[in-house]
Amino acid sequence: MKGLVRYDLTQLTGNSKRSFYLLYFAGLIVVSLAVGGGKIFSYMAVMIGCMMGVSFFSYETWYHWDRYCAALPLSNRQIVVSRYISLLITTGCGVLLGFVIGLLSFAAGRIELSWTQWLASLAQTILVALLYIEIEVPVMYRFGVERGRLVNILLFVVLYSCALALAELSQVPTEFVTIVRIAFGVAWLVILLLFPVSIAVSMRIRAKKEY
């Protein structure tokens, strides 16, 4: 399984791809510091990290990776679970970058929220990103790269909008803080419990395909 995860991540670390991502994320940092909006750009970095799954499936299709895997002693479960692990790693990188953008924006005075409010909003964005992964992988296995990409773009727009809306919950009146915290804790529990369900659905969809 480690080899499968390493293969996924290798697709994103070629010389040209590495340069592109470095320039892209450096651009996010520069823009957030130059024109403000560090809050939004820090959230965007997290969501971009979880969207890397589309690239994994694209490379898989171009190189006929599934046909190659079919000839190897790899179980359906190993292949599917490794994809989730790869996505969690790229999402973690997005979280790290978002954290850096937030820190630099605070240092430059470009975020109007308090430190605790921004951290709470970032945690909410991570929650949305995890939900995106749980939906993204089954969708890509079910519809393939072309149709799946369109669905995932729409899903990204909807969930990113939800993340921005949830960020406003960090500014709720004091009397509702406890209720929001309970709801947030329940949401985290539900999202984490949905991971085994998402993995099972992805395994079932993939098992029905012929390579």
Image (tube, helix red, strand yellow):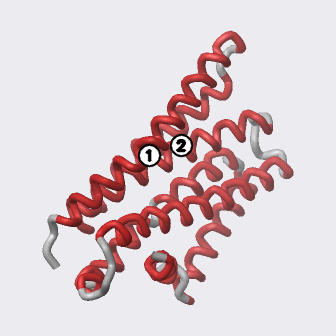
Write down the residue under mark 1: 131
Q: Position of residue 68 (x, y in %)?
A: 27, 87
Q: Is residue 7 left or right of residue 203?
A: right
Q: Is 208 located above or below residue 33 in the figure? A: below
The quadrant in which the C terminus is found is bottom left
- Report the amino acid beneath label 1: Leu
Q: Nearer the viewer, residue 205 or 128?
A: 205
In which quarter of the view is residue 109 placed?
Answer: top right
Q: Nearer the viewer, residue 17 or 26?
A: 17
- Report the amino acid beneath label 2: Leu
Q: Tell me what residue is drawn at x 46 percent, y 40 percent.
A: 191
The quadrant in which the N terminus is found is bottom left
Q: Is residue 198 left or right of residue 84?
A: left
Write down the residue under mark 2: 127
Q: Position of residue 24 (x, y in %)?
A: 59, 70
Identity of the residue furthest to the right in this view: 107
Q: Position of residue 97 (x, y in %)?
A: 67, 61
Q: Tell me what residue is drawn at x 23 percent, y 65 percent.
A: 206
Numbered mark located on residue 120 in the image: none
Neighbours of disc 1 within 10 Å: few (<14), some (14-19), many (20+): many
In which quarter of the view is residue 167 placed?
Answer: top right
Q: Is residue 104 left or right of residue 132?
A: right
Label pair 1/2, CB-CB below 8 angstroms: yes
Q: Nearer the viewer, residue 24 or 80?
A: 80
| Residue 134 seen from this side | yes
Q: Tell me what residue is drawn at x 40 percent, y 64 percent.
A: 81
Q: Is 9 located above or below residue 153 in the figure? A: below
Identity of the residue furthest to the top in this view: 175
Q: Position of residue 94 (x, y in %)?
A: 60, 60
